[in-house]
Structure formats: C-alpha cells, structure tokens
Image (tube, rainbow, N blue to C red):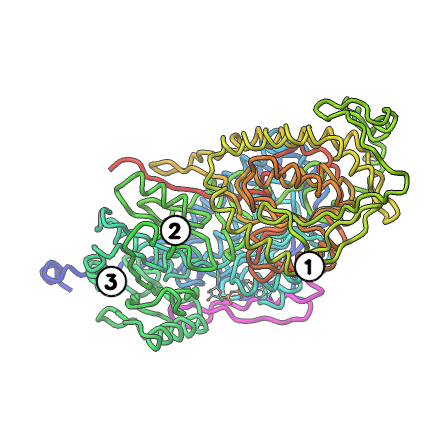
Amino acid sequence: MSVTEIFQTMDWGPAPEAAAPATEWLDAHGRKFGLFIGGEWREPQEGRFFETLNPANAKPLAQIAQAGAADIDRAVEAATKALKEWQAIGGHARARYLYALARQVQKNSRFLAVLETLDNGKPIRETRDIDVPLVARHFYYHAGWAQLMEAELPGYRPVGVCGQIIPWNFPLLMLAWKIAPALATGNTVILKPAEFTSLTALAFAEICERIGLPPGVVNVVTGDGETGKLIVGHPGIHKIAFTGSTEVGRMIRTKTAGSGKKLSLELGGKSPFLIFDDADLDSAVEGLVDAIWFNQGQVCCAGSRLLVQESVAERVIAKTKARMEKLRVGDPLDKAIDIGAIVAPVQLQRISTLVEQGRQEGAEVFQPSWACPKEGWFYPPTLLTHVEPASTVSQIEIFGPVLVAMTFRTPSEAVELANNTVYGLAASVWTENVNLAHEIAARVKAGTVWINCTNQFDAASGFGGYRESGFGREGGKEGLYEYVIAPGGGGSLKDERRMTRDPERENTPAREAPHTPTPQNLSTLAPNAQFPGVANTPIPQHPNTPPLDRTHKLYIGGKQVRPDGGLSLQVGEQEVGRGNRKDVRNAVEVAIAAQKGWAAATPSLRTQILYYLAENLEAAMAPMLGALGGADLASGAPAIDADREFGAAIGVVFTFAAKADKFDGLVHPAPFKGVVYTQNEPIGVVGIVCGDGAPLAGLIAPICAAIAMGNAVVVIPSEANPLPAVELYRVLDTSDVPGGVVDIVTGRHDEIVPTLAAHDGIDAIWCFDPKLGAEVERLSVGNLKQTWVAGEIDWLRDPVARPDLLLRHATQVKNVWTPIGE
Ligand code: NAI
C-alpha cells in the first residue's frame, strides 16, 4: 500500500509483534510440558497429555500434562512439606521472594505477553499493557503485605495448603491474584490453570525455579475439570480459591460443604453499564467499547448490559454502532487490533447459540458490515436491542463480545434494572452529576462500581462479587483475610475443632466475673427483696394454685407470634415455641422487607438504637439471668457461667453500638487519577444459628454485629437453652429496633435450620451449631449465599476483644472508582 493510498483510506497497516520469544521457548521444551511439583518437573503418572491450541489459527502449540490422582497426592505432599519452613522464614524473607517474582515478571514481560496472546487469543496490546503489568503490580503489592503481616494482622495464621483453580480469560493475571496473597500470608499452593491456557502458568513455574523459591511452595498441576475435582476433594488441602463459571462454583460449594475447607469463589457476572442523559456521551461510548469488547468480552465483569436513559438512547445506540463499525478484529499479535480470537471452539459455539436464542426471543441483532478472519475462532462485536429485562440474553452470562441494550426513564428504574440479575460483580455509572453518580454507586449491588470509567483494576483494590457472583475478595487488605485464620478461630471448622481441643486454651482461667448478680446470689436474696423499679407488694398465693403456664412464642416482624404448627418444646420447666418451615419462611419475608429501611438508617442512628438496647437489656437483667440458670443441662448443654455471660452480653452491645459508626471503609492508593474508596455494605438478611456454649453472648454478639452494619437477621437460638432469646425479644419489644430487623424462631434445629440454609431470601448464614455446619454449607448452594460455619470457640465468648471478625462477616466490601479532573 502506498503512502497516498494510506492517506486516502486512513486504514491501519499491520503492526505485528514477533512471536519468536514464545515460540523459541516452546521449541526449547520440545513443545511438551510436565507438572511442576516440589520444585521439580515431573511426568504425569498416568502418562496422559492433551494439546493446547492457538485460537488465532487453530494450530497446536504444545502438549500439556493431564494430572491424575497420584499427581495431586504428590503435589499435596510437597506443599504440606514446604509449609513449615515457608512460615518459619518469616514475613521479610517471604517479601523478598515475592519481590523477586515481581522483578522477574517485569524482566520477562515481553515474553510473557506474547506467550499469553498465543495461548489465549487476546490482543497483544492488552497482554502487554494490562495483564502483565498488573501481574507484576500484584506481586510487588503483596511483597508489602508479607513484610507487614506480623504488624498488620497480629495473631493471624496462614490457612495451610491452598488449592487454586483458575479460568482461561486472564490466565497469568488470575494466577497472580491467587498466588501472591497466599504466599504473602505464609501458605503454600497447588495451582491449576485452565486447560485451554496452561502455558504462562508453566512459564511462571520456571520463574519460581529461577528465583530459588523453596520447593513445594508453588506447585503447578495442569489438567481439565477432572484434575480440578481432585484438588477440590483432596483432604490435605485446607482452602479452595476458585474463579470460573457459576455452575462449577456451585459444584465446588457442594463438594466442600462440611469438609472444613475455607472457600472463596469469584464467579460470573452480567454487569450493568448505566448511561444517564447528562453523561458525556462520547466518553461513555468509548467506555462502553472497553467494557464489553475488552478481551473479546470474555471478562467476568464485562459491562454486558447497557442501560441507557430513554432520552439519549437513540443517540447512544447510533454512536455505538458507528464505533463498532470501526473496531478491528484479527490477528491478536497485531498491535493495531482491538478484538482478538475467542479462546476455543466450544466458547465460540456457546456465544453463537446464545445470540441466536436472543434473535428468536425477539432481539434485533446488529453486527458491523465487515467479516471476521476465517482462520481461527473469531466472533464480531454484536449489539442486541429490543430485549426484555427477563430474556435469556439479558440474564445469562454470554462471555463473548455481545452487548445487550435496554432503556430506563428514572434513576430508580435504572437501579431496579441494574439489580435485576442473580449476579453482582461490577457496574459502571456514567453521569456528570456527582450526587447522582454516588447515589447510584451506593444502590447498585456490585462488588466494584466504576464512575465515569470502567475496567479499572489494581492490587490495592479488592475485587469480588455480591450474590451469585461469589464471595471473598482478591486484592487489597480485604483479600488477605481469605488466606488467614483469625486469632481464636474464624477459619475452617476443622481448624476450630482442633483449637477447641487445645489444652492450653482449655486451661485458660476464666475472666474475672463482672460485678453483676448471679442466679446463685440472687437466690440468696429474701423473697420480694427490693429491686429497683419493682413494686414490693406481696402477691397473695394460695398454696394449691398451679403456677401460671408460660409458653414463649416466636418473634417475627416485631410481634410475638404463635408457632404455625401450634407446637411447643419443653425447656426445663418452661416451654418455647416449636417453629416450623412456614415460620422460618415468614420470618425471612419480614426480614427482607425490614432490611431495606434499616440499611438506609444512618450509622449514628443505629449506634443510638444499640445503646438503648443495652440500657433495656440491663434493666431486664433478672429474667435474663433466670433464663441462663434454666439451662437444660440434661440435654448436654455445657454449664453456663451466668455472670460472665451477662457481663459479656452488655459489653457486646456496647461494642457493636460503638462500631456501628466506626467500621468504615478505606481510600485505596491505586495508581489512578482519582479516588478509589471502599464501603463496608450490609449483606442483606443474615440467618444466624446459635450454638449451645454461650446462650446469651453467643446470641447477642452475632445479632448486634449483623444489625449494627444494617443487616436484618433471622435467628435460631440455641436448641438446648433458647430462654435468653425469648427474654431478648421482650427487650427488643421495648427498644427502638424496627420490627422485622430481628426475627427469632425457636425450635428443633434439625427441623428448621435446613429451611433457613436453603432459603434464597437469606444472603448469608452463620452457623455456630457444629452438628449442622456441613448441611448448612451444602444447602447454601441454591443462591450461593455466604456461609460462616464456626464451632464453639473462644472468640464467641470474647467478641468485645475482636469485634472486627464478626463485622467483616457482616459486611461486603464495595470498591468505588471515581476519576478526578478533566
Ligand atoms: P469452568 O468454570 O468450567 O472452568 C474454570 C476452571 O475450573 C478451569 O480451570 C477448569 O478446568 C476448572 N473446572 C472445571 N470443572 C471443574 C470441577 N468440576 N471442579 C473443579 N474445577 C473445575 O469454565 P469454562 O467451562 O472454561 O467456561 C464456561 C463458562 O463459564 C464461560 O462461557 C463463562 O460464561 C464462564 N466463565 C466465567 C469466568 C469468570 O471469570 N467469571 C471464567 C471462565 C468461564
């Protein structure tokens, strides 16, 4: 093409990046790779290999080992063996290793970028400018946390051996997101890349070798979903970190239920991209291109649902179509390409099928006039208009370069539409009105919100989802908690069981009792002794009068209600309501209704309401202590130290009252011209299943932590001793806690806990009844609610010392990115 022709057409010429650094490396390895286990390269024991292909031309790149059960055993053995030394070397030494990894990633950045592009099909522009620099940044950032861990997370311990399973859309970046925090906090890892994209993980394993990382600290095992299953099911692994499809995330949740493994899931999304009528429309359309056509739309947080205000919809759609016409699809190694290849034929098929389904459901399909390359697997940028909010293409993650567009009229309607999916990973909000921007950011249910920008990522800012987009965060301080066990427990159930048997802990002397009366010294008071505020008039009693029958009810929607089945349970000399499934459902329904308003109350109002609750609780001390004394010890409930319980309970309410307006977010110093702030948002409705060990403090602490943060709770009190709970609702009745925010259903745990755990209206469930932990985890899979299963552990008796552990479980972190300047 001549210069004159170029000036006439203004077309881009080819600007290919040389494949040589990567192909030479592949050739040097004979285009065949083993497994990296215990610092050595090993053949898979079953001798099986599969091919990895270049999506841009469908040609084979290399043979990859398929790890089997014996290989995973060896990897677990190596990772377990490496743990002790890796922890013993301390934070500073680990920081040096992470720093060395970061340096090596930078030094090999061109090689890694080319290799990633060959294996995945994503444009070199992205691997070179986004993926690889972010990988280096992740290791640098976590080198810092390794250095600071002892000071910043005192008493926290590593989880142990971590199984990490990653997807194919950001192979090296997902590896960094998983490995860096795990290593920084003293864990060892077994990482499995996705079967389509193993090469950069293998190159990374070589980097680990090169820097002299102790053998077994990082193990890379390749293979498909079968290998993934072996990792998930292995009893020697203490934590599973998974990124991938919601479907597999569900399977992993089910499989790990009751195993004691810690779990974090980063799953799918259907993220809204909201354009308001006052937005800078050209910038917004440019943002949209990045939101949905970055990485061929194979991005969990892709802005795949365009929600545009009706008054500007036509203009935005016209501008988007014009921009689509100019996008370039082609050889990913070409530096002037916008959209590369789709990772595999199966993914291409899935995209085509879903677009076809959209067409059949009435969508209008727009694609640019030009054709994609015939060699390799390509799909053109696609826009679907005239779609319904409930249609398949509006609800299902397509994971390809396909945008669906809908309109809205008012901000509230925009929020309704934005939240109208099961997901909650990210959102992008475009408006020049700062008030509106932050209001929408607060109301959209998503782990990350970008204001007037999109697809911003940084190691300092935790990434992860709400709802069925998974739980746990990667990056930021919030991400570290996924790889540590809190002092006194808070980690896996298995671990906590071990801790409860710790003889040192068992010999810990009880704290000095606070100066409050006990049932014993109360009983030594003369009958009718003067209590402040209680009339001292003797009540005439006939010797043969039967005692008044006192059957406690349930507490739902701020009212005492009879159990639906009309049944009760005998507890000591009293009876409590025996709730059933219907009662649980009613309680969840009213809790959902109450939560919205409660979350909208200011934190300072919640603080005041909690202090007032403490005041009322203290006034109700006598019946509470009586209730504690009425523990049904015959049922096996541990003996209760009433003094300690009651003193702790008041302290607990004060602590969470104090925290309600202090458990605040952060401003992350991301390399971004603007502000990245985090908010600790309520999760929604939290189900709480109490254990028997601390019937009062163990009841009050989780309730107060959850409601302090703006959640509503459905509580199932201790089965052996529910009496403090029935006294508590009398206190709640006189407090200012709005009806429905705390709902209490007493009854047999085996009858009602499963309904609570399976209920889709519950957003998180905390189970402190060790008998039911496994079942709660298993039943949570329907809406992938967050679960926290913990045994009877010290922290529950001492939440005043460590309130943040409860508060972290009571909140989810939202990161909001706001640019500053023109
Ligand atoms: P996938 O969820 O099957 O694969 C992700 C990883 O999990 C891979 O390493 C895979 O080998 C492993 N895996 C598969 N089955 C497993 C099992 N039963 N136990 C343990 N590990 C298992 O995702 P896939 O099939 O590659 O893509 C299918 C769809 O999933 C995509 O079309 C997209 O919608 C979604 N997806 C979402 C991702 C995200 O980041 N949110 C990433 C990848 C896929």
Q: Which residue is mark 2?
A: 427
Looking at the rendering, which quadrant does residue 116 occupy? bottom left
Q: Which residue is mark 3?
A: 324
Instruction: Give the Cα separation between the discs numbered 2 and 1.
Output: 39 Å
Question: Whole-percent x and y of residue 475?
Answer: 51, 43
Front-most of residues 439 and 316: 439
Dot 2 alpha-carbon crowd within 10 angstroms: few under 14, some 14 to 19, many 20 or more: many
Upstream in the sequence, badge 1 or badge 3? 3
Looking at the rendering, which quadrant does residue 498 occupy? top right
Q: Residue at x 61, y 39 (%)?
A: 733
Q: Which mark is residue 580?
A: 1
Going by the numbered disc 3, the residue's amino acid type is Met
In the image, residue 528 above or below residue 764: above
Going by the numbered disc 1, the residue's amino acid type is Asn
Write the start and end of the magenta stretch as one range.
45-71
Looking at the rendering, which quadrant does residue 77 occupy? bottom right
Residue 420 visible to the viewer? yes
Please name which of the two marks, 2 or 1, marks the residue nearer to the observer: 1
- SS of the residue under disc 3: helix
In the image, residue 295 above or below residue 54: above
Is disc 2 in contact with disc 1, using a CB cutoff of under 8 Å?
no
Dot 3 alpha-carbon crowd within 10 angstroms: few under 14, some 14 to 19, many 20 or more: many
- Left or right, 787 with respect to 236, comes to left
Question: Whole-percent x and y of residue 708?
Answer: 56, 37
In the image, residue 367 above or below residue 256: below
Please name which of the two marks, 1 or 3, marks the residue nearer to the observer: 1
Outermost residue to the bottom: 360
